[in-house]
Image (spheres, grey):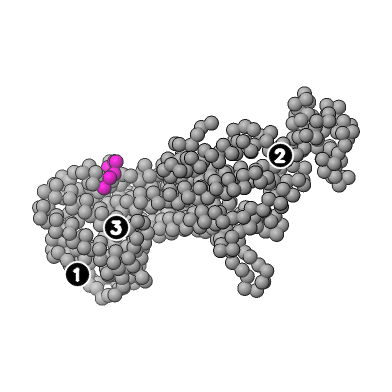
Amino acid sequence: MKTARPKSPRTPHKAPRPSSQPTSTKSSDKTKLWGGRFQGKTDALVESFTASIGFDCRLYEYDIEGSIAHCKTLQRAKVLTTRESQTIIKGLYRIREAIRAGNHQWKIEDEDVHMSIERQLTQLIGPLGGKLHTGRSRNDQITLDLRLFLRDALQHFQRDLCRLQQSLVALAERYKDVMMPGYTHLQRAQPVLFSHHALAYVEMLERDKGRLSDALVRIDVMPLGSGALAGTNYAIDRQYTANLLKFPKISQNSLDAVSDRDYVIEVLSGCAILMMHLSRLSEELILWSSQEFQFVDLPDGFCTGSSMMPQKKNPDIPELIRGKTGRVYGHLFSLLTTVKGLPLSYNRDLQEDKEPLFDTIDTTTTSVKIYAELLAQLTVRPEPMNKAVSEGFLLATELADYLVKRGVPFRESHHIVGSLVRECLIKGKDLRDLTQQDLFKASSSFDSKAFQVLTPEAAINQKNIVGGTATTQVASQIKAWEKALRAKPNSSTKKKRTS
Ligand code: ARG
């Protein structure tokens, strides 16, 4: 007998998970809820091949919630008497308690979560249990379960993403005045504040949150009443079911309702984009923690050593998150491919939506949570960053802009400073080592004040424009994010200032 572990009621979208694969006991077709039409016994290999119970058992909370609402709707339509409906609902509560406590048997021969619960109900309350499925099909039931699951999972996800943003903002605040080279083409380009760089990821995550909460609008549609594909013969009040389950809308086309999974694909796509962002962050952390950069120290608790080389401290967490990004992309493509050739309406292929979805939610959630912690403990090393800022002609553009302010066309000033850089390279000097005479020789528009722009601080603070890296700009961004993220997690987009 295999049982499910108890689960935390605070995160119902998480797997109850049978402690191992569900058991298979001897079965004949008569044991199947759909067995009436069959004479031959289901092949054992087919039984385990078709079963989804090993993974869809994690939908049990939603399946039961949906069944309770369906039962109340049947009662309202007088398909069930009050007493019948009460008995069924009590039975469902008991099953829910048993699953939560790990006392439910998940059996392969039950095929999926829906039939496992229905069979258990009939065992508990007798043939009356068989009335629950009136006017319903597993085809509308499964898409309801998925919608309820996603609604829940995405709400938790918004909170986790918000925490990750808070870690990044706190990191920016902790090291707000540290300068680093900004890069293009991975070549040192212009000085920026480290805090500005950290906040770039906060922006990306805000858009990720936005994408996932947009998806929620399309997830929040109640499909029950669609039946197997055509609707149902019973005059059930679908709006009533929707109200019970807190859905703002009901689906308007039964064929579409049972056959589409675009809302799952949207979530997979939103998660793939989010993982792409985390993967870029990973790449930077891996580079920055290398001997070559030495910009950051990853916390020991988030690194591992080498079994052979005693000196090694490896950035496994960023590497794994970068690696798992490929896996999440794969899930997106797997479902897009599964659905692309399906004629309307429901096809069994659609059962293949769950494993990619669950693994995507689990992988992405863990990656987000782990980064929220890692970044809270990240050490930034200002000296190597400062050293990198002072080498490599990062201030050449400042000098060119200085000439522009004195009336020289930018193309010309670009050329003048380019030749100064070339001269410095030949002589093994930096722009700051040039004399006033060197400058004057290159352009008569230079004067003694030109050297004042040749500091990284000046270069940074010149970028005093919304979105720029100047200290005051970044400080006000930090403040705005702190305020926005203190508000409700998914309202930060609205609350964020527009200045
Ligand atoms: N396990 C199925 C799925 O995930 C549930 C619906 C099955 N419907 C059916 N007619 N076989 O899609």
Q: Amino acid at mark 2?
A: Glu
Looking at this view, name the residue that lies furthest to the top.
407
Predominant SS of the magenta segment = loop
Disc 3: CA contacts within 10 A as few (<14), some (14-19) or many (>=20) = many
* Residues under numbered marks 2 and 1 in contact, where contact means CB atoms less than 8 Å apart: no
The secondary element bearing badge 3 is classed as helix
Q: Is residue 162 left or right of residue 118?
A: right
Magenta region, residue range: 245-251
Residue 381 shows in the view: yes
Q: Is residue 439 left or right of residue 130?
A: right
Read off the residue under disc 2.
457
Q: Quadrant of residue 347?
A: bottom left
Q: Position of residue 7 (x, y in %)?
A: 34, 63
Image: 134 above or below 190: below
Read off the residue under disc 3.
61
Q: Is residue 186 left or right of residue 499?
A: right
Residue 108 shows in the view: no
Q: Quadrant of the N terminus?
A: bottom left
**In 3D space, how far apart are the residues under numbered discs 3 and 2 (Cα atoms)?**
57 Å
Choose the circle earlier in sequence order: 1 or 3.
1
Q: Position of residue 481 (x, y in %)?
A: 51, 41
Disc nearest the viewer among 2 and 1:
2
| Callout 3: CB less than 8 Å from ligand 1 | no
Choose the circle earlier in sequence order: 2 or 1.
1
**In 3D space, how far apart are the residues under numbered discs 2 and 1 (Cα atoms)?**
80 Å
Q: Quadrant of residue 10?
A: bottom left
On residue 272, the disc is none
Q: Position of residue 331 (x, y in %)?
A: 46, 56
Read off the residue under disc 1.
30
Q: Amino acid at mark 1?
A: Lys
